[in-house]
Image (spheres, rainbow, N blue to C red):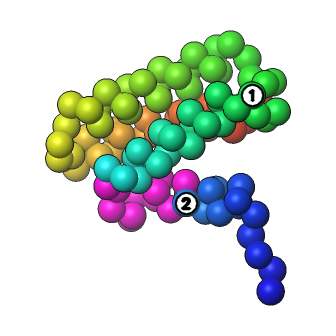
Amino acid sequence: MNRLSDDELDQQKISRFLDPSHPLCRSDVIWILDWIKKKVAADNPSTLGLSQPQLWKGFSRFAEAAMLLIHCQRFSYDETDRLRKLLAEAVSAIRSPS
């Protein structure tokens, strides 16, 4: 049996959470925000090569998503769509070095 690595499992979760057909819940958002925090805070080699503008973009989207999570107990369709886009941009910003 071929077992997936933790990173592969994380990537599958992120893809599922960011899929518009997946109903996004608070725990999904918290999981993604925590994943981003860990990637950046751990001096992960993949994040060390990121440019400052990329880091700022990722942080801006991260912070905006976190504030939306704090201020909204329930998300409307538009807020869910906005939150999903913010999370996708934050994940994208820390995934790929420029």
Q: Secondary structure at mark 2?
A: helix
Q: Where does label 1 land, which residue?
A: 43
Establish if 83 lies above or below 93.
below
> Quadrant location of residue 43?
top right
Residue 88 shown left or right of residue 2 in the figure: left
Residue 47 drawn at (x, y percent): 74, 30
Residue 50 drawn at (x, y percent): 74, 23
Q: Does the magenta run of residues contain 30? A: no
The region drawn magenta spans 14-25
In the displayed image of the protein, which residue is found farthest to the front? 42
Residue 51 drawn at (x, y percent): 73, 17
Q: Where does label 2 land, which residue?
A: 13
Residue 79 shown left or right of residue 3 in the figure: left
Residue drawn at x 64%, y 28% as measured from the top left: 41
Q: Is residue 88 visible?
A: no
> Quadrant location of residue 24?
bottom left
For the N terminus, the quadrant is: bottom right
